[in-house]
Structure formats: C-alpha cells, structure tokens
C-alpha cells in the first residue's frame, strides 16, 4: 500500500508492517485494536486505522470507538456514500483475512446507499422530477467528476479553480444553469444537450446539488459563489449601457 506524504501511517503501525506490500490481518488481530488511541475497523473487507481520525469523525468519536475492532461494513454503508470510503483511503492499512473486497462504484454513479440521493432517485415517485431531470443529474455529475481531483487538491492547498475548469464548465452551460434562464441568451448549450425550453427550477436545483456533491466547500466557493449571488440581478435589472 502506498501512502501520500501527508498521510503516512502512525509510527506504531509503520514499525510493524511493510506498507509497500499487501498486508492481511486475522479477526483476532483486528479485535486487539478496539480502544481509544488504537482503533481499527473493517469496511468492505479492508482494514482502516481510525485511531487519529476518530476525534474528527463527523458522527462523533464515540460512534467509532463503540465499533472498533469489528467489521462495520453494514453500519458504514447505512450512512455513507461511496466517495467517503475513497476519500479516506489514506487510513487503509490492509485487508481482513477470508473476506472478499468488493469493487466500489464510481463517484459519478447514482448511489444506492440509503439517503445518499434525493428520494426521487431512490425509487420513490415524484410529481416534480421527470426523465429529463434524471438524465440531467447524471450528465452534470459526470461533468463535475472530471474535476474531482482538482477540487480535492484545491481544498487542501488553497489553490483556486483553474482557468481550464471555468472555461469547460462555461462552455458546457453549467455555470449558466446555476444563474438561471436570464443567462441563457449568452450560451448555446446546456449539459447533456438538455433543451433550454425544458429547463426549469428543478434542473437549476440539481445543478446546485451536484456541485455540492464534490464535498469541497472552500474550493467550490471559488467556482462561482459570487457569480451566482451577484450576476442574476445585474442580468435581470441592469441597463445595456
């Protein structure tokens, strides 16, 4: 296993294991790491050292410590989207012996994890969303996923969105989707080729939801927060002069 420089394994772990080679642990070994400061969990057949992460866990440290030393796959998938596991891959230290590791769906796929998507995408009927909305969400998600790596890097380094990113989103009509129909006279297409006449407030809402799907709030603020707030009134009420 290869760790990026900023996410090296704890020294206590690094001394015992060679992370340049795949490491497999038994259930007995897993169960030994079940206390504060030395906590391991298993998700999808892979072992994660959450000792240092536990205090930062959004769901609270106690939740992780209660399940330390165990396979928490069922609990994890009940509350987390696929990309969460990928985001914290730096905590992975090996696999659990005898358990098959399943491939994780791509972040651009519609998640099947409970509550990870709006109810209309989880099998519930909705009077507000039709097939154009479902296609639009996928098209926008695929477009934004092109820049996930840049977004995550920018979130940690403070680097602003690139000119290439802004031009790509602009040329695809995504930026205009976040502003609304007042911006449509200035573009010639929408993501996925959506008919401009079919665009409604629910498509606009999807555009805002999907950009949040990148989960990099600081970086996303540089992807048009000021534009989204300030440009609509200018387009709506500003004079041609």
Image (tube, helix red, strand yellow):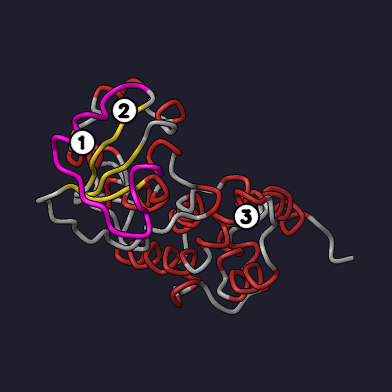
Residue 26 highlighted magenta (yes or no): yes
Q: The residue tagged with tag 2: helix, strand or loop?
A: helix
Front one among 226 and 42: 42
Label drawn at residue 30: 1
Task: Tell me the crowding category of disc 1: few under 14, some 14 to 19, or many 20 or more residues within 10 angstroms, Cα based.
Answer: many
Disc 3 designates what residue?
154
Residue 112 percent coordinates (x, y):
23, 52
- The range drawn in magenta is 14-36
- Residue at the spot x=52%, y=62% of the render? 149
Front one among 95 and 167: 95
How far apart are the two marked residues, 2 and 1, measured between alpha carbons?
A: 14 Å
Outermost residue toward the right in this view: 241
Is 181 above or below relative to 194? above
Outermost residue toward the left in this view: 98
Q: The residue tagged with tag 3: helix, strand or loop?
A: helix
The reply, left or right, for residue 74 in relation to residue 164 is: left
How far apart are the two marked residues, 2 and 3, measured between alpha carbons?
A: 28 Å
Whichever of callouts 1 and 3 sits on the residue coming sooner in the sequence is 1
Would you say the residues marked 2 and 1 are in contact, meaning their CB atoms lie under 8 Å apart?
no
Whichever of callouts 2 and 3 sits on the residue coming sooner in the sequence is 2
Label drawn at residue 64: 2
Pair 1/3: label in front: 1
Residue 196 highlighted magenta (yes or no): no
């Amino acid at each position: 296993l290869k760790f990026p420089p900023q996410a090296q394994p704890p020294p206590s772990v690094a001394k015992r294991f060679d992370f340049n080679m795949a490491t497999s642990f038994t259930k007995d070994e897993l169960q030994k790491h079940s206390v504060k400061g030395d906590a391991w969990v298993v998700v999808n057949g892979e072992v994660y050292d959450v000792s240092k992460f536990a205090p930062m866990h959004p769901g609270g440290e106690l939740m992780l410590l209660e399940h330390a030393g165990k396979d928490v796959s069922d609990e994890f998938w009940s509350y987390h989207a696929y990309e969460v596991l990928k985001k914290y891959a730096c905590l992975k230290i090996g696999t659990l012996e005898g358990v098959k590791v399943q491939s994780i769906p791509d972040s651009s796929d519609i998640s099947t994890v409970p509550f990870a998507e709006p109810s209309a995408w989880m099998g519930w009927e909705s009077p507000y969303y039709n097939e154009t909305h479902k296609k639009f969400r996928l098209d926008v998600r695929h477009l934004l996923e092109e820049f996930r790596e840049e977004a995550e890097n920018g979130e940690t380094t403070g680097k602003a969105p690139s000119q290439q990113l802004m031009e790509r989103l602009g040329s695809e009509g995504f930026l205009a989707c976040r502003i609304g129909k007042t911006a449509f006279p200035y573009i010639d297409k929408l993501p996925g080729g959506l008919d401009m006449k079919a665009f409604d407030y629910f498509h606009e809402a999807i555009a805002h939801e999907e950009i949040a799907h990148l989960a990099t709030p600081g970086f996303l603020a540089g992807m048009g927060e000021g534009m989204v707030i300030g440009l609509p009134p200018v387009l709506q009420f500003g004079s041609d002069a």
